[in-house]
Amino acid sequence: MHPYLFELASLMTIFAFVIVSPGADLAMVMRQAIVHGRKRAIVTSFGIGTAFMMHVSYTILGLGLIISQSIFLFNIVKWCGVAYLFYIGVKSLRAGKTDLTGEIAGQGEPQEQGLPKAFLLGFAANALNPKAVFFFLSIFSAVISVHTPMSVKFGYGLVMASCLIGWFIGVSVFMTTAKMRAAFSRASQWIDRISGAVFIVLGLKLATEKAG
């Protein structure tokens, strides 16, 4: 097997477990699918994938090492992430009941969300996560040779980002099937409360993270 293919296979084996593990990205896509529909959940998935490539890029360029070694820079990213998770958590907790047409009970107006906002929600959820810095630094250092060309490393990142987007698109489609949407519509307010609590817990967990 070509050494580059072996490196990619090793990366994807590790990354497969990362993709399916619960986290802010998955919670975001699931809520987007339930509340705002398939199209916006898919756009959010692309936002997550774009932020993922941002992490890959600065890690390959060496900026990730700088951030990981600077408590000041790490804390800036960390507390921005904590604030963002708390914001969407509180917003979810305060949301009203959503029916199948995407209307809020008692208001009579559909929940409209622009595609740029859907993209930015996904991008921010992934970008404001300093743990991604250490994840890429650790697996790239452990799996990828220092002699691997930068272009090949970016290629690895594109493959991983594509798989990540594909996974979340699958989640978006599954969560918006007729049966799933009807079931979640009936329990929409509880779903918002649970997802809001999840975002806040993730924010609290992130707040306890330390550099190094």
Image (cartoon, rainbow, N blue to C red):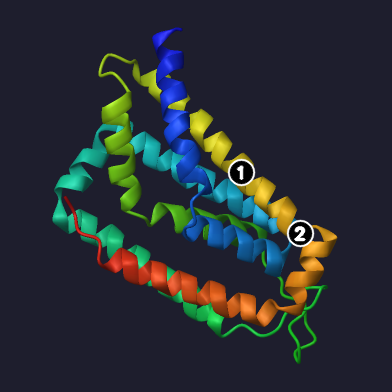
At a point 63% along the width and 75% down the height, the residue shown is: 191
In this view of the protein, can residue 21 be seen by the observer?
A: yes
On screen, 154 above or below 168? above
Q: Nearer the viewer, residue 39 or 196?
A: 196
On screen, 207 above or below 73? below
Left or right of 205? Residue 9 is right
Q: Which mark is residue 176?
A: 2
Instruction: Say which residue label 1 marks.
Output: 167
Secondary structure beneath disc 2?
loop
User: Measured from the top left, where is residue 197 in percent x and y?
Assistant: 48, 76
Picture quadrant where residue 38 is located: bottom right
Number of dots carrying numbers: 2
- The Cα–Cα distance between marks 2 and 1, rounded to whole angstroms, is 14 Å
Q: Amino acid at mark 2?
A: Thr
- Most distant residue in the top direction: 1
Picture quadrant where residue 109 is located: bottom right
At a point 42% along the width and 25% down the height, the residue shown is: 10
Graded by Cα atoms within 10 Å as few (under 14), some (14 to 19) or many (20 or more), the crowding at tag 1 reads some
Left or right of 151? Residue 108 is right
Secondary structure beneath disc 1?
helix
Q: Nearer the viewer, residue 127 or 35?
A: 35
User: Measured from the top left, where is residue 62 in percent x and y?
Assistant: 24, 33
At a point 38% along the width and 42% down the height, the residue shown is: 55
At a point 55% along the width and 72% down the height, the residue shown is: 195
In this view of the protein, can residue 84 be seen by the observer?
A: no
Graded by Cα atoms within 10 Å as few (under 14), some (14 to 19) or many (20 or more), the crowding at tag 2 reads many
User: Measured from the top left, where is residue 98 in percent x and y?
Assistant: 73, 79
Marks 2 and 1, the one that precedes in the sequence: 1
User: Measured from the top left, where is residue 6 in percent x and y?
Assistant: 42, 16
Q: Amino acid at mark 1?
A: Trp
On screen, 133 above or below 141? below
Picture quadrant where residue 65 is located: top left
